[in-house]
Amino acid sequence: MKKKLEALRELQAEARQGGGEKRIEKMHEQGKLTARERLEVLLDEGSFEEIDMLVRHQTRDFGLDKQRFLGDSVVVGTGTIEGRMVCVFSQDFTVFGGSLSAAHSQKICKIMDLAMKIGAPVIGLNDSGGARIQEGVVSLGAYADIFLRNTLASGVIPQISAVMGPCAG
């Protein structure tokens, strides 16, 4: 049991590194915060609870089977702002330029569904080059899943979006 918990902690540490130290340094050189750093600034200290931290994309084409980052270019979860519960997603530009894959979309849709279920605002921190074209029409269809939830949530919960960098989607 102890070995399994240690293996889990190692995977979680890897996931927290996003696209790796070099890409994080490049973000900092550009004066930008990473997806996780943005959440640390936005949310009450210690309140963030991440969901689907270990999700990876399932694409095997175009060499993507050799590039399977934990978290797949978006950090999602719940937290509080001045004590009020919020659902959040923060696109991670250090992983494939924050591009939207099917897995990325599923994570966003899951947190949006949760927000509607519990009546919490959803906040999106956008920093993405757009669809992950290696996934073809699947990634384009993934936008439709998110847009459907935008319409379902309209007038039901607050939806807040902040553009933190490129935003092609």
Image (spheres, grey):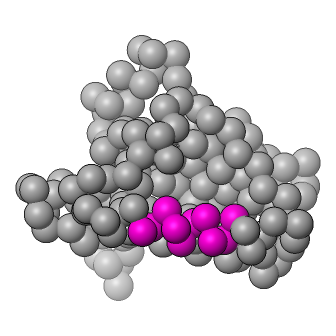
Please, is residue 136 above or below residue 106 in the view?
above
Which residue corresponds to the image point at 85% horizontal and 58% vertical from the top-left? 158
Residue 52 showing in the rendered view: no
Residue 55 showing in the rendered view: yes
Which residue corresponds to the image point at 32% horizontal and 31% vertical from the top-left? 23
Magenta stretch: helix, strand or loop mostly: helix
Which residue corresponds to the image point at 57% horizontal and 37% vertical from the top-left? 37
The image quarter in which residue 116 lies: bottom right
Residue 142 on the magenta span:
yes
Please, is residue 169 above or below residue 69 in the view?
above
In the displayed structure image, the side of residue 131 where residue 125 appears, left or right: right
Residue 114 in picture, x, y percent from top left: 70, 76
The segment highlighted magenta reads 141-150
Q: How many marks?
A: 0
Residue 11 in picture, x, y percent from top left: 33, 62
In the displayed structure image, the side of residue 18 where residue 37 appears, left or right: right
Instruction: State the residue in front, 33 or 121.
Output: 121
Residue 73 in picture, x, y percent from top left: 40, 52
The image quarter in which residue 58 lies: bottom left
Residue 94 in picture, x, y percent from top left: 37, 38
The image quarter in which residue 120 lies: bottom right
Quarter of the image that includes the N terminus: bottom left
Which residue corresponds to the image point at 52% horizontal and 68% vertical from the top-left? 144
